[in-house]
Structure formats: C-alpha cells, structure tokens
C-alpha cells in the first residue's frame, strides 16, 4: 500500500479524517438540526366540566373544542384528523375516519397509531394532598368499530406527542417571519457594516498617512496598533460602559443625560475593536507598493493627489479589502460587545447563545437555524471578498519600497495629532481598566482612593482561571502550530490529487464559522459517549485549535512559500529521506515565519470569548469567561479589572518579545 | 596540498545510460524518447532554450521527477525506480540552494553527517572540499555573508564532499556576472578533470557549453537535436535549429541540382560537397564567409549596413532585393562597396 510507504499521505488522511470529524460534521449536525423537526404535539385537560384544549402547548396540531366542551376536533396539516369525545370523567373515546391502533408496553408507555404516524400519550394527574392512592394509570382498549377508548386519571392533563422526525423548513419560516429573529439579523448586519465603515475611514486613512509620510515614531504607532489588535474582545465594551454607561464615571461626573448603552454604543465600541486589523493590513499594503508604479504615474504628469487615487489606493486595494473582510467578520460574530453594551439589543450571536443555553425558553432548533443563517451571511461576505480578489486580484511584487515623503512641521503636527487621537481612543479601555484596577469599589462604583485590594482579592480567590487559560493557550498553540506546519507542507509541496484540495477547504471552513456557532456544533457532536467531551478541558482546546487552524495553516503556507523547493532537493540529493528533510531543513526554515503565526494563535486563544462562553463548564473556566460574567452581573469591577490586567500581561509580554526579537532572528532567504 | 584525490575510497565517475526516456505533465510532453550514453568521467552538457526539456532530463536523472517510460542506468544498474536520496549524486542548483540558517560548515557537512562519517573526518573532509573550490576559513560564516561566486563554490563543495560518482549541475552560473562566469568556468572544468567525476551540465549559454564540454546534446522541444563534440556542433550543425542556437549563422534557401546550389532567384554557386539533389538550406558562419574583390567570388554583394562588435566589424551584404548575408571582417568596409563572396566553408542542411 502506498499509504504505508508515504508518511505524508498517511498524515494527510489522518488530518483529513480529524478535520472532517471535528469541523465538517458538527456543522452538518447543526444544519440537520435546523431542517429536521418532530411531528409536533398537543395537550388537553379533562376536568369534570369538560374537555379543554391547551393551544399554547400545541405544536403543529390544531385543537378545537366542540359540542360545548364534550368533544375535541384535532387536525394537522396533511389530512390528519382525530375526534376526541368524553364518555365519563375518566374515559375518552378517540375516533377517526380510519382504524386507530394502540400499543401498550405495560410500563405506562402508551401510543396510538393513526394515519402513518404514531402518537405517544402521557398524562399528568394532580394528586390531592391527602390522597394516598396513586392516580389511575393510562390504559387503552380497541373497540370493534376501529375507535379507541382511553382511560386516564381524574382531572388529567393529557399530552399527545408525535416523535417521528421529518424534514421541514418550518424553522426557517419561523425565522424569517419571527419579529425577534428578523430584528436580530438586521441588527447584526447594520452593526457589522456600519462599524466596519467607521473603522475603515479611521484605519485606512491613518495607514496611508503613516505608510507614505515620514511621520515621527512610526514604529511605535504600528506597535500600538498591533497591541490594540489583540485586545480581549470584551475589554472595550466593559470600559466604555464604565465611563459612559447609565451610571458611568464620566456621565455621572458631568451630570449629562447620555448613555452609551444601545445600538450606537455597540457600533462605536466595535468600530474601535476592529479598526486595528484594517489599519495593519492597509499599512502593509501601502508599504508593499512598488516605487516605480508611483514614479511612472508622476512621470506622466500625475500630481500626488492624482497618483494617490489613481495608482496607490487601487494597487493597495486587495490588502484593504482583506482587512475589511476580517473586520466585518469580527464585528458580525462579536458576542461580548452587544451583550455588555446592547443590553436588550438582540444580535445573531446573542440570539443563538440565549436560545441554545438559557434556562427558560431553550430552543435548540432556533439556535441551529440562527447558526446556519449566521454562517450563510459570513460565507456571503467571504464570497464577495473572493470574487473581488479573483476579478481585481493581483499581487504587487515590490522590488523597491517607496520612500516616505517628508512632512512640514505643520504636517508633522497634524499627522501626529491624528495618530495620537486614534490611539487614544483605541487605548481608552486599557487605561480605564488599569486605573480602575487600583481604585476602591463600593456598590458598583469606583472611588478615587488608591488600593491594591483588587489584586489581593484576585490572588485570594485563586488563580485557577489563569492556569486554565495558560494551559489551554500553550497546548492549543502547540497543536495548532504542529498541525498547521504539516498541513501547509502537504498543501504547498505534496499537492495530492483530491485529498489536498478537500483538506484545504475543510481546514479553512472555521474562517466563516463564528465562535458561538462553532461551540454549539461541538456540543451537539460531542455530547454522547464514546466521545463525550462537553464540559471538559479538551472541548475548549479542540474549539481553540479548530478556530485557529486557518490562521496557522495560512501563516505556515506563507512561510513555506518563502522556502525554495531547491533547498529541500539539495538535502534529498545528499541522501536525506523525506521526513528527515522536513525536520532538518524545511521546518527550521519555516520556523521564523511560523513563530509569528504561533504567537498570534496564542493571543487569539487567551482572548477567545464567543466559543468559550458556550463551551466552558466549571472547573475549566478560562479567564475570559470569568471576567465576562463578572462584568455582566454588575458586580464590583475591581477584581475584574485586576484580572483583565493579568490577562493583558499574558497577551502583551509574548507580543512584545516577538516584535522585539522577531526582527533580528528573521532569516534572509536567497 | 590536501586533495580529494588523496581520499582512497573515492570512486571513479560512473557511466550514465539513458534509454528511451519520456516524460509528460498531463497533456504536455516535455521529453520524447530521449536516448544517450554519458561516458565515465565525461563533461557532458545539455544545451537548449528554456522549455526544451534539459532541466527536466537532469532532474529525472537526479530522481526528482519520476519518468513515464524508459530507463536510466548508472554503470549498468537501473535506477529508474530508485528514490533520489538513494542515488548518491551531487547536485548543484541554479540558486545554489544553500540553507540560509546553517553555517557554511553545516551546509557542507550535511551529506557527511547523513553518511555517519566520524566527526574528525567530517571536519577534515569539509576543509578539503572547501580548499578544492578555493575557499578558506569560511566554515563559521553564513551563506548570506558570501558573494554569489562564493556561494556557487560552496554549493559545489557541498555536492562534491560526499564523493559522488556523478555531478549534476543545473545552470549554476546563470546568476553570476559575465566576467566571473568566464573565470569560474575554467575552474569548474579543471576541478572536474582533477577528480574524474562524471558531470552533466545544463545551460542555455552556448559559449559556456562549447568551452566546458567533452560532448554536447542540443535539445529542442523535448528531443535531442544533435549530440556531438563542441567543434562539430559549431562547425557541422545537423539541423537549422542547432545552427541558429549555437553561434551566428547565415541561411540561404534554395535547391541542389547538377552539383550546384541554386538560389531561388536563379543564381547558383559551386559547393565542395553538394550531395544529393533536392531542396536544401545553405548555412555558413559570418566569420567563415570569405570576402574577395567584386567578380572574384561566387556571388557579388553590396555593403548595406555595418555593426561594430569589438573584435571586428560585421557587415550586412545585400545579395538582391530581399536577400542578404552577414559577414565578419577585421577591417571596416564602406557602405555601397561591392564584394565577391566565397562560400567554400558552407554546409547544406536538409529538411528532416
């Protein structure tokens, strides 16, 4: 067998099987949950006074009392009709056009067969306070005329349930006709598009200024933007509400009647959350322009403004569009901000979460339908991006970077002022948390008195969440990194027919799956033995690996494309076998590029909220979940602030190390 | 001076036999039924334009590309199904493919470590190999610190240090500037002669091929157009493609009849070896075309253009309305002057 001789083929097959089982199947499971429904049910109460239908508890069946409460007419789409009439206080006659069958397993599980479907009958009987005898059990007997006589307890509440499954689009019909669902969808679209638009105006213009003009402290500006790009996703929402909420520090202090809570606040906060990714991608697109392209325009008589709009921005467009897409996706799937700032505002991720997990009104079918709609919307965004890139896509290979234009003193002040203002807004949350973590908290309000008690409280309450976060971060990064390296090698160098393209598509799928949806899919998939992972550390690790796989694979692919195939072949010609070539030559050369990808993976994992909040069960509760829940219950923010500072240290120390030492270790390839 | 020659275990160059090798990428055939035998110790060149299949053939010999049909044998042993890492060959890549993250020592020592050579011997052999390519005290440096020419030498040392019986070179000089290329060529030839390894060299540079090689195979469209010694390739090309690709050439279309070559406009000229009658193309190098006084040659022509190429002047000589030849002369002639042409050195090419 070729599989046993070719280690890479074996790896590809194993990786493909794992990816299909953990990425594709949960999504299919969600899809099937949204299109498969049971046959519905109806309930009735039989009191001494007569038969009463319970319309609010009936699903798909219509019940109608006739004959002054002495009979019920039950119908369902598809020609189903059943007549129920009372015989005495504890006896009913059930009749239909055709013969009704009954089965009784003797344990009180009674069911009727009628018109191709089966109805399970259950009763709930009230039990008097001093009544010592059990209520009479259900029993059914077949009559010669094809009807059934049903005996039940006195004053029983009877439920008829059709457990048979069938394909149905009723969930989707409910979704597009439901008030809440339509509103949540429109809110999601409106928020993500308007937040992206605001972020794009800020991000692209700042990127252009910093990339094309000789602005002081450019490296610092880019570093701060990088820092902002990996902030915990709920940090902004929490801080802005603290400052400008109904009882906010600034709103109270100034005595203005203003609150950030509402859809405008969600847009504002998300815009600041997603602007760094647009800035960073636009910045590298502008820096990647080739000097000769711009010089060609200038030599033909284009002034700087003309060259900017006719040459520079169009050439940077692929990078900008990718930034816009990533920002829209982040805005669309953000769970924390609408939950904290939106209050009663419904958006799709929140709707999915509450309908799947809330104690009351749990509705998994709605959650599944919402998930499918959300994935469909993000797939449409991806498609739009891909179509744009395919049509207008080109890669600018820069042979000579553009010199930054010098700035006059006034220009320098304007540019620095702009950058400073943008970074100030981006870092308002960080500064707020830092300051409030040293403030005393009384009944949900900070007092201006310096204290370390928040930190001591945090240490006393235990650092378990920090260890959970760290262990998940390290393990998840290691697995995603190793898989990413291997899969990238298969995709770039091996290119097996069929297997490689399928693997590529499967691995990239989580790119369009919001965290909430991914989490629910995993719960549906791994909730039963032998693969019961829900509530464990492993399901969190699994979710994080899956969510980051597209990024590690892309980063490794990019790193691998920098490694010329001849470098592998040189080792082969000297007698090295494939695995040895990979370990001694290819992997070390990819490392420099892949380490950056791995760091980003680590940062994504420790700040991950949307899938965490669906999947975690104590004691495996990561820091993001702890902080998020504390901010929701309006408790003293002090400890949360201290925890957030700890989380930011976990994020920014590795980021700093990579930025600081990553450059000098970069290896020039021939 | 320590020398690879002093290594007693060093094998002689091997014979490479290529039999009916074909290779296609999907519908695109890149090698069609190629057959050739390369002698032990020979310096053999595959010459041709890009896309002619020369690199594919070299990589097939190395084992990087599986072949669709045919056989490749080293010293009579079929290696067609052998993995590239088991073929024991030295390969020098166009971009040198030095590992940028390893020192020069680690680059050169890689193949020895794989062969489990004792540590002390590795150091000695790496030093010897670097000396062979005229490099000293560079072991601890990184490839990025070296010039292109030095990288090229290191790549050579890395390929030769394992004492391969066969050395494959894929356009190793194409990234170097012209002057360096000329001096390295001579070094490469000397080194190959000294150690006796069989070398197969791929290039599109005809000058390089003519200077270096014992024999040359000129390839075009996946087939070997001509396989000969350099002097025969240059002086007696068998096809128009070879004549055009190697050196400058004049071609005159016409037909052979009654022992004479007739141009299309009716004029004719006498040839030393006219051969069979029929359509043919007359071929002569510009420097072999003899210029004599008007009326003294076989045809008369008028100078219509002059180009200076350094070592001589090349003159465009009009034979008629749309017919001209190029002739090289050590002195500058005048435009409008008429000369007689001597075609004694011409050969005839016939359509296959």
Image (cartoon, helix red, strand yellow):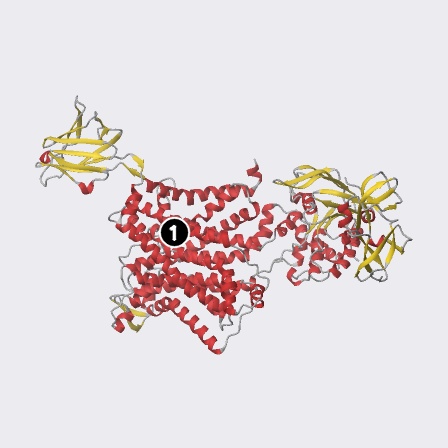
Indicate the position of residue A248 as horizontal and vertical percent values.
28, 68
Front one among A490 and A82? A82
Question: In the figure, residue B69 lies in which quadrant?
Answer: top right
Across and down, in percent, residue A656 comes to: 47, 65
Identify which residue is drawn at 42% across, 71% down: A418
- Residue B239, picture quadrant: top right
Q: Is residue A228 left or right of residue A240?
A: right
On the image, the x and y values in percent for residue A65 come to: 13, 36
The picture quadrant where one finds residue B107 is bottom right
Q: Residue at x 46, y 49 (%)?
A: A508
Secondary structure found at label 1:
loop
Q: Residue furthest top?
A: A144
Q: Is residue B277 above or below residue A331?
A: above
Q: Is residue A215 left or right of residue A670?
A: left
Residue under mark 1: which chain is it in? Answer: A
- Report the number of numbered marks: 1
Other-residue count near label 1 (Cα within 10 Å), few / some / many at <14 / 14–19 / ≥20: many
Res A259 visible: yes
Residue A457 in sight here: no
- Name the spot of residue A11 as percent of width and height, x first: 52, 43
Residue B117 left/right relative to A428: right
Q: Nearer the viewer, residue A38 or A582?
A: A38
**Residue nearer the viewer, B51 or A347:** B51
Give the residue at mark 1: A514
Quadrant the N terminus of chain A occupies: top right
């Amino acid at each position: 067998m070729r599989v046993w001789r070719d280690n890479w083929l074996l790896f590809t097959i194993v990786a493909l099987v794992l990816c299909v089982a953990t990425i594709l199947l949960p999504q299919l499971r969600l899809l099937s949950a949204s299109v498969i429904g049971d046959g519905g049910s109806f309930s009735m109460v039989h009191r001494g006074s007569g038969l009463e239908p319970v319309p609010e508890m009936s699903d798909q069946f219509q019940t109608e009392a006739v004959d002054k409460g002495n009979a019920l007419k039950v119908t369902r789409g598809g020609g189903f009709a059943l007549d129920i009439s009372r015989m005495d206080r504890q006896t009913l006659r059930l009749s239909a056009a055709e013969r009704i069958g009954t089965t009784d397993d003797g344990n009180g599980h009674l069911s009727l067969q009628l018109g191709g479907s089966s109805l399970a009958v259950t009763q709930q009987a009230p039990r008097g306070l001093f009544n010592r005898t059990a209520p009479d059990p259900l029993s059914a007997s077949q009559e010669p005329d094809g009807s059934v006589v049903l005996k039940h307890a006195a004053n029983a509440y009877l439920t008829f349930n059709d457990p048979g499954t069938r394909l149905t689009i009723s969930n989707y019909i409910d979704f597009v006709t439901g008030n809440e669902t339509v509103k949540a969808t429109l809110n999601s679209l409106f928020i993500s598009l308007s937040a992206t638009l605001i972020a794009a105006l800020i991000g692209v213009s700042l990127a252009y200024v910093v990339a094309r003009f000789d602005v002081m402290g450019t490296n610092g500006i880019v570093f701060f933007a990088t820092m902002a790009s990996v902030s915990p996703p709920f940090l902004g929402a929490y801080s802005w509400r603290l400052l400008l909420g109904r009882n906010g520090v600034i709103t109270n202090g100034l005595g203005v009647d203003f609150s950030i809570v509402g859809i405008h606040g969600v847009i504002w906060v998300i815009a600041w959350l997603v602007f760094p990714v647009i800035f960073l991608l636009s910045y590298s697109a502008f820096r990647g322009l080739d000097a000769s392209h711009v010089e060609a325009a200038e030599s033909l008589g284009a002034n700087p403004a003309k060259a900017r709009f006719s040459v520079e921005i169009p050439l940077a467009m692929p990078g900008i569009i990718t930034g816009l897409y990533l920002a829209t996706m982040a805005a669309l799937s953000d769970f924390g901000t609408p939950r904290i700032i939106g209050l009663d505002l419904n958006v799709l991720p929140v709707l999915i979460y509450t309908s799947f997990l809330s104690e009351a009104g749990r509705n998994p079918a709605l959650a599944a339908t919402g998930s499918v709609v959300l994935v469909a919307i993000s797939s449409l965004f991806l498609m739009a991006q891909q179509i744009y890139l395919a049509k207008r896509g080109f890669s600018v290979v820069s042979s000579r970077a553009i010199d930054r234009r010098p700035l006059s003193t006034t220009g320098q002040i304007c540019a620095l002022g702009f950058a400073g203002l943008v970074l100030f807004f981006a870092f308002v949350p960080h500064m707020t948390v830092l300051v409030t973590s040293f403030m005393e908290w009384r009944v949900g309000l900070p007092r201006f008195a310096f204290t370390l008690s928040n930190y001591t409280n945090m240490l006393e309450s235990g650092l378990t969440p920090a260890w959970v976060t760290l262990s998940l971060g390290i393990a998840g990064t290691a697995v995603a990194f190793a898989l990413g390296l291997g899969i990238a090698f298969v995709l770039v160098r091996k290119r097996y027919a069929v297997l490689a393209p399928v693997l590529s598509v499967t691995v990239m799928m989580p790119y369009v799956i919001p965290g909430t949806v991914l989490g629910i899919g995993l719960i549906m998939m791994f909730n039963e033995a032998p693969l019961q992972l829900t509530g464990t550390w492993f399901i969190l690790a699994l979710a994080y690996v899956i969510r980051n796989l597209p990024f590690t694979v892309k980063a490794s692919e990019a790193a691998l494309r920098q490694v010329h195939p001849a470098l592998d072949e040189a080792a082969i010609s000297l007698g090295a076998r494939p695995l040895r070539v990979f370990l001694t030559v290819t992997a070390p050369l990819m490392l420099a590029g892949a380490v950056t990808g791995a760091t980003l993976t680590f940062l994504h994992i420790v700040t991950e909220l949307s899938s965490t909040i669906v999947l975690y069960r104590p004691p495996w509760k990561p820091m993001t979940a702890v902080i998020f829940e504390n901010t929701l219950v309006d408790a003293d923010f002090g400890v949360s602030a201290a925890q957030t500072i700890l989380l930011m240290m976990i994020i920014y120390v590795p980021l700093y190390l990579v930025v600081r030492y990553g450059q000098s270790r970069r290896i020039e390839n021939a | 001076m320590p020398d690879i020659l002093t290594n007693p275990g060093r094998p002689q160059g091997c014979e490479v036999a290529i039999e009916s090798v074909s290779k296609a990428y999907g519908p695109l055939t890149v090698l069609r039924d190629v057959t050739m035998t390369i002698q032990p110790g020979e310096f053999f060149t595959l010459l041709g334009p890009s896309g002619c299949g020369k690199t594919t053939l070299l990589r097939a010999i190395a084992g990087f590309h599986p072949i669709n049909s045919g056989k490749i044998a080293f010293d009579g042993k079929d290696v067609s199904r052998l993995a590239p890492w088991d073929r024991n060959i030295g390969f020098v890549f166009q971009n040198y493919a030095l590992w940028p993250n390893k020192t020069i020592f680690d680059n050169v020592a890689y193949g020895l470590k794989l062969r489990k050579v004792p540590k002390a011997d590795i150091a000695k052999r790496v030093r010897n190999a670097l000396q062979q390519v005229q490099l000293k005290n560079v072991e601890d440096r990184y490839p990025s610190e070296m010039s292109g020419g030095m990288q090229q030498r290191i790549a050579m040392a890395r390929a030769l240090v394992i004492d391969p019986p066969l050395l494959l070179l894929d356009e190793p000089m194409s990234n170097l500037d012209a002057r360096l290329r000329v001096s390295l060529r001579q070094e490469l030839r000397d080194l190959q002669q000294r150690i006796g390894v069989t070398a197969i060299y791929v290039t599109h540079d005809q000058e390089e091929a003519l200077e270096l090689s014992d024999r040359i195979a000129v390839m075009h469209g996946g087939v070997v157009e001509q396989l000969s010694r350099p002097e025969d390739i240059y002086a007696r090309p068998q096809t128009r493609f070879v004549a055009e690709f190697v050196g400058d050439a004049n071609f005159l279309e016409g037909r052979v009849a009654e022992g004479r070559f007739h141009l299309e406009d009716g004029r004719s000229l006498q040839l030393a070896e006219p051969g069979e009658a029929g359509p043919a193309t007359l071929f002569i190098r510009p420097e072999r075309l003899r210029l004599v006084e008007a009326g003294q040659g076989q045809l008369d022509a008028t100078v219509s253009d002059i180009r200076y190429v350094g070592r001589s002047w090349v003159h465009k000589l009009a034979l008629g309305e749309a017919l001209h030849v190029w002739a090289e002369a050590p002195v500058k002639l005048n435009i409008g002057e008429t000369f007689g042409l001597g075609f004694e050195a011409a050969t005839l090419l016939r359509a296959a």
